[in-house]
Amino acid sequence: MDQGTTLLTIESALRIVFGLRFLSSGISNVRRWPHATHTAKLVFPQGATFFGMLATAMMVLGGSGLTLGLQTPIAALMLALFLIPTFKVHQHWLQVLPNTLKAVGESITNEEAKGQFQLIGRHAIHSHEVGWQTNIVLLVMALFFCARGSAAFGLDNLMDSWVVRIF
């Protein structure tokens, strides 16, 4: 396989995996409803139900679009717009978790259970410490596909004149 074909194949695989990551997360939000509204309330105290539904729709539609290579620039823009407020979610939990973990940990009397709880707490904090960093990577990838679109192996290539270009 020549380098051009290899790059298009890898780029397509990246687009598909990226799309599936958000599609599965969006479907998870549907199954665990109203979890998305609780998370949305951290960023949007007013209208949390609306914003939870909007975030879930953006993940499902954006993820589907990227996976299929269908209206790829718009699908990627949906994901970029979804990702921006998630930085505040990570910030919230990094501020709240330490005190919450301390208070709950102090109420646990069994030493083995206390040790296990502390381990879970460290993992929870770590996930939000790296979560915002991961979101930067995902945001850059979304912006890449906003600009690039579906280079190959996507439905956009079958209906190029219908694709809405952002850049």
Image: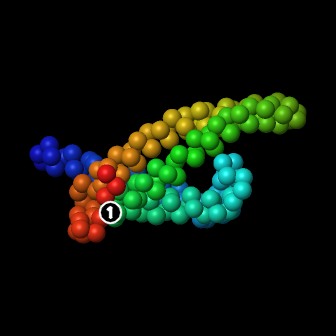
Residue 35, position in %: x, y? 67, 57
Residue at the spot x=57%, y=62% of the render? Answer: 54
Crowdedness of circle 1 by 10 Å Cα count: few (<14), some, many (20+)? few
Residue 69, position in %: x, y? 32, 61
Q: Is residue 109 above or below residue 30?
A: above
When asked about the image quadrant of residue 99, the answer is top right
In the rendered image, the residue lying farthest to the left is: 2
Q: Amino acid at mark 1?
A: Val
Residue at the spot x=49%, y=51% of the render? Answer: 81
Q: Nearer the viewer, residue 130 or 165?
A: 165
* Left or right of 89, for residue 135: left
Residue at the spot x=63%, y=59% of the render? Answer: 52
Q: Is residue 137 visible?
A: yes
Colour style of the rendered protein structure: rainbow
Q: Secondary structure at mark 1?
A: loop
Q: Nearer the viewer, residue 104 or 135?
A: 135
Q: How many marks?
A: 1
Q: Is residue 24 visible?
A: no
Residue 8, position in %: x, y? 22, 50
* Left or right of 4, for residue 142: right
* Left or right of 117, for residue 76: left
Residue 165, position in %: x, y? 31, 58
In the rendered image, which residue does mark 1 sit on? Answer: 164
Residue at the spot x=86%, y=31% of the render? Answer: 106
In the rendered image, the residue lying farthest to the front is: 167
